[in-house]
Amino acid sequence: MGSVFPLSLLLLSAAAYWGSGTVPGRRARRAQGPRESPPAPSGTSASFWVRISPQSVAVRPGVSVWLNCSHSCPLPPNSSLHTQLRRGPTLSGPGWVSYQLLDVRAWSSDVRCFVTCAGETRGATARIATYKAPHSVVLEPPVLEGGMYTLRCHVTRVFPVGFLVVTLRCGGRVIYSESLERFTGLDPANVTLTHAFPAGLRDFGQPVTCLACLSLDGLVVGSSSAPITLTLAWSPASEALAFTSVAVLVVILVAVGAAYLRRCLAMRSRRRGGVLCRLSGGKEESGTMRGTLPDQ
């Protein structure tokens, strides 16, 4: 028993020593807190955007264009431009890259800007179109059909038709206007606009014009037809009907005039006959009176 007691004291001392050493270590580690991980990027691929401006532009053939591709990637990105147009100089800065496109002659071309950020690629698209002002604007003379005046305006060799607005004016007022935005062709085209309207007395003698305008994101390019005065214009059918009506009216007037003339002549002849009778009766009475005078 004497040997067991010192041995147990030795074990208790060792346990106390090791326990007193580990608890302060744990407290120290807790006081230090968790270790900081390397800082994560402030932005992720899910939050960055890519924009291109202008998104739509129209220019005359042969003009150069600048496009700006901007992004919100916080890391050094990789950017590129995909286009079939001829490229010129490139300028760049924090969050943007500008590209110049030279001698634009395609009627319509899509340009795509791509930016890769944190392994993810996003893009934006712009459309560049060249425009052609109307080669000619011709307004046909108004034609009267069934009480309505029909106007036809011909616009030739214009592009893009989808940006064309055709307006008909009579004097100082607009009688009709139409936007052709539903047309999406990629080549110059000819356009004919037909409109019928009832003209009032105030419209006669007023100049009628046709105006064709391209509305290109703030740029307006247009051409106008020569003015035509609104008069009594007749279609062949209307002319035939009018001629027939006039002929029938003349026949009726001639018939009525002839009947009236015959009646007047008959009444005049009757009046003359009555006067002759009265005159002849007066002569007989005077002769009788002369025959009854006594002889001297």
Image (tube, rainbow, N blue to C red):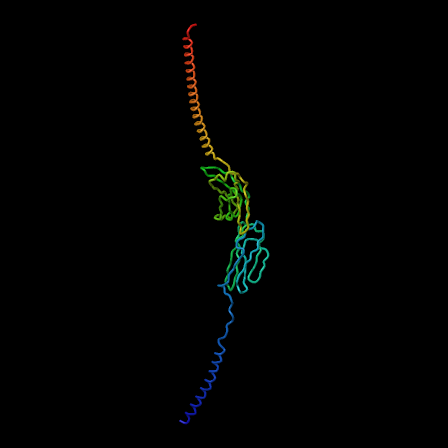
Q: Which residue lies most toward the bottom here?
A: 2
Q: Is residue 270 left or right of residue 122?
A: left
Where is residue 239? Give x, y as percent: 47, 33
The number of numbered discs placed on residues in the rendered structure image is: 0
Residue lying at the far left in this picture: please name it.
1
Quadrant, the N terminus: bottom left
Q: Nearer the viewer, residue 250 or 194?
A: 250
Q: Nearer the viewer, residue 274 or 243?
A: 274
**Most foreground residue, 8 or 262:** 262
User: Relative to 287, does residue 238 appear above or below in the rendering?
Assistant: below
- Residue 287 image position (x, y, % from top left): 42, 10
Residue 3, image x, y percentages: 42, 93
Q: Quadrant of the C terminus?
A: top left
Establish if 184 lies above or below 13. Answer: above
Residue 248: x %, y % from top left? 44, 29
Name the residue nearer the viewer: 28 or 225. Answer: 225
Furthest toward the front, the residue is 296
* Farthest right residue in view: 89
